[in-house]
Image: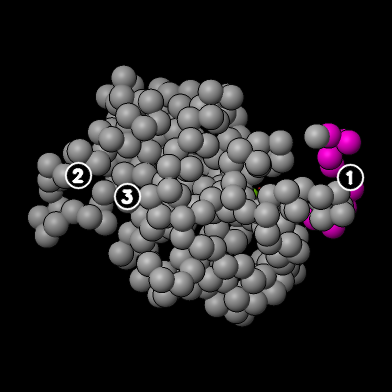
């Protein structure tokens, strides 16, 4: 891929009187993990939804791999792990079925899973360490295991751009380490990864770059620079470093 995997220009999104994004500009390169950092209500989830074409955009542009969000969705170019899953947990689908949904964009004319789809699903399950639980009903996983299942779905999709909205919320240290390793290897494969998190301490291990969001991007650069107190104060309004590290 040449050019940015994701290019957001001067994006404004409002919900009635609430201005969630206000002239937000961000460019995300392939081969990198970019951390998206911002306080509650700063517009992180709205930014992801705008990239997925799931909210109405007031002004500005979103370009995914050179095309529109709708084209990217149709071509399965972009994979998305939402902050909370709007799924019916009683729905009778297995973990394997959920991961297999990531392959819908790849299914042929007959929409029947082919050998390569099954291989992609098996590999994704193995990478999030859910092989053993593959036949379980999705509602019978713990919250953290379920999060990993949705990460596996995005991996199986083989998307060039991966969006993960707080994948570490409610996830233990071991699952977090698994996901961090995975995102790193996906970036090493040339994918672009944009991941929002509140865990500033995990950021140096997680990301190559960080973007600080407060309705617009205040800073985008190295993780070390992003974590400087003067930048964090601008993004969070208070010194959140607590003097460490
Ligand atoms: N559907 C909606 N209707 C009205 N206002 C909304 C809606 N969704 C989000 N908002 C508002 O838009 C702003 C940005 O919300 P958003 O969910 O994008 O923030 P966030 O950075 O993801 O926050 P968090 O860290 O809590 O997940 C907030 O003020 C929020 O209350
Ligand atoms: Mg959010």
Q: Which residues are the magenta region?
A: 234-244
Q: Residue at x 40, y 75 (%)?
A: 67
Using the numbered discs, state the Cα–Cα distance from disc 2 to disc 3 in whole angstroms: 9 Å
Helix, strand or loop at label 3? It is: loop
Residue corresponding to mark 1: 239
Count neighbours of disc 1 (C-alpha within 10 A) and say few if under 14, some if 14 to 19, many if 20 or more: some
Marks 3 and 1: CB-CB under 8 Å? no
Q: Point out the image quarter for the N terminus.
A: bottom left
Query: Would you say 38 lies left or right of 228 here?
Result: left
Way the structure is coloured: one colour
Q: Which mark is residue 117?
A: 2
Query: Would you say 58 lies left or right of 243 here?
Result: left
Marks 1 and 2: CB-CB under 8 Å? no
Marks 2 and 3: CB-CB under 8 Å? no
| Residue 18 image offset from top left, x and y in percent | 74, 65
Helix, strand or loop at label 2? It is: helix
Using the numbered discs, state the Cα–Cα distance from disc 3 to disc 1 in whole angstroms: 39 Å
Does the magenta run of residues contain 142?
no
205 is higher (above) or lower (below) than 221:
above
Count neighbours of disc 2 (C-alpha within 10 A) and say few if under 14, some if 14 to 19, many if 20 or more: some
Residue corresponding to mark 3: 157
């Amino acid at each position: 891929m040449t050019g940015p995997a994701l290019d957001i220009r001067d994006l404004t999104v409002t919900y009635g009187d609430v201005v969630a994004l206000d002239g937000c500009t961000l460019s995300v390169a392939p081969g990198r993990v970019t951390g998206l950092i911002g306080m509650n209500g700063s517009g992180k989830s709205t930014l992801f939804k705008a990239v997925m074409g799931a909210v109405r955009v007031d002004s500005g542009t979103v370009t995914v791999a050179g095309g529109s969000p709708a084209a990217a969705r149709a071509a399965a170019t972009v994979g998305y792990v939402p902050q909370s899953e709007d799924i019916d947990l009683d729905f009778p689908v297995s973990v394997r079925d959920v991961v297999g949904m990531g392959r819908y964009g790849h299914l042929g004319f007959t929409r029947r899973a082919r050998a390569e789809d099954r291989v992609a699903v098996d590999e994704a399950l193995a990478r999030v360490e859910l092989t053993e639980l593959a036949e379980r009903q999705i509602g019978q996983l713990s919250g953290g295991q379920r999060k990993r299942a949705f990460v596996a779905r995005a991996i199986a999709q083989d998307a060039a751009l991966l969006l993960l909205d707080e994948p570490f919320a409610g996830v233990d240290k071991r699952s977090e380490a698994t996901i961090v390793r995975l995102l790193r290897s996906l970036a090493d494969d040339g994918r672009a990864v944009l991941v929002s998190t509140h865990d500033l301490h995990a950021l140096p291990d997680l990301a190559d770059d960080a973007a600080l969001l407060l309705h617009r991007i205040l800073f985008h650069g190295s993780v070390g620079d992003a974590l400087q107190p003067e930048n964090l104060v601008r993004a969070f309004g208070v010194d959140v470093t607590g003097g460490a590290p």
